Image: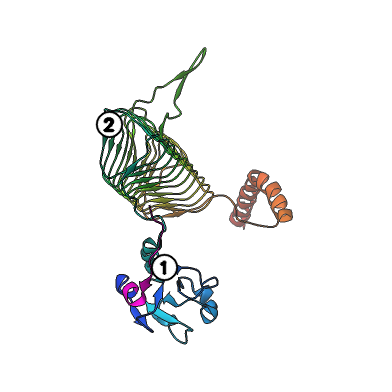
Amino acid sequence: MSNTVPTYLLSDLASRVGGRLLGDANLSVSSLNTLDASEPSQLSFLANKKYVSRLATTRATAVLVAEEYAKNLPCAAIIVSDPYLAFAQLTKLFDWRAPCSPYIDQSASISMSSSISTDVYISPGVVIGDNVVVESGVYIGANSVIGNNCVIARNTRLEAGVVLYDNVQIGEGCLIHSSVILGGDGFGFAPAKEGWVKIHQLGGVRIGRDVEIGAGTTIDRGALDHTYIHDGVKLDNQIQIAHNVVIGEQTAIAGCTAIAGSTRIGSRCTIAGLSGIVGHLTIADNTHVTAMTLISKSVTEPGQVLSSGTGQELHRDWKKNVVRFKQLNQMAKRITTLEQQVKNFSSEG
């Protein structure tokens, strides 16, 4: 396995992102960096106009910029309509995690009943259970555990220490980061006089294509049907997704969000960090949830932006407002009484 990162001519990079090159087409770059930290032989970008002043002092060989910021630059430029998107497209070229040559470490424990493609990379300490299918181009990191009856589709990468319980299927081209656990039991118990009776979780987990799941995220198996994460979903670190949740295509969810059981989230939603969504709800397509929001009822109208909680303020002001918040019910009653008195006074006049 090689971690060598090649260099690229600016003319080649401009062609790859559909940009227009200003400067020497034969200059080359070998990595990406921010405007402030860039050195010669690096490519940078301007995606936010509040950093425009940094263009004048960057040491980068070239920058990705929109047309309006392409004047009087100290370096070459690739003019594109969306510099951030162009930057994202080029990061793949400079990823040090190069494709691996086929390899199965002798310390891996693989069931004879499993079907393993010949062109996979299986690291030391991997355990693969019965009736597992591992397709071509798959990478499985050290000490990962793959339970029985799992499927890992082609060109998917599991980093070190990933755990798949039984009956988990992962689609093509996914990236599963370390300490992800897929298919653990959902939190299901029925109350009884003697205590809690466990509801055995009989479903599985189904992950679509081009899904990325961040480190430490957990996705529980369904109670009867499966838990579904559809194509193109992006999940940050340390997210909890409970049993029978369905997440629609191209939805992105930031870290430390928790989603309770049987909730259905639509396509192309964004959910910011530390948000909570209670169970058995439906969230419409294109819903955008801001940080630390609690969603406690279904969202039926697509395209809404939702927030809850209070914003940042000085601690002394926050303490005063906490007291006032507790007085809101009494204040509302007083306002209602005053409104009635005004109404009575007006009618008497």
Nearest to the observer: residue 62 or residue 1: 1
- Residue 342 sits above or below residue 9 on the image: above
169 with respect to 57 (left or right): left
Q: CA distance from mark 2 to mark 1?
A: 42 Å
Residue 6 highlighted magenta (yes or no): yes
Q: What is the secondary structure assignment of the residue under circle 1? A: helix
Specify the amino acid type for callout 2. Ser
User: Residue 4: x percent and y percent?
Assistant: 40, 61
Nearest to the observer: residue 45 or residue 67: 45
- Residue 260 sits above or below residue 8 on the image: above
- Residue at position x 38%, y 77% in the image: 78
Q: What is the secondary structure assignment of the residue under circle 2? A: loop
Q: Quadrant of the C terminus?
A: bottom right
Q: Residue furthest front?
A: 106
Residue 57 location, quadrant: bottom right
Residue on which disc 1 sits:
84
Residue on which disc 2 sits:
114
User: Magenta residues, as a range?
Assistant: 1-13
Nearest to the observer: residue 9 or residue 342: 9
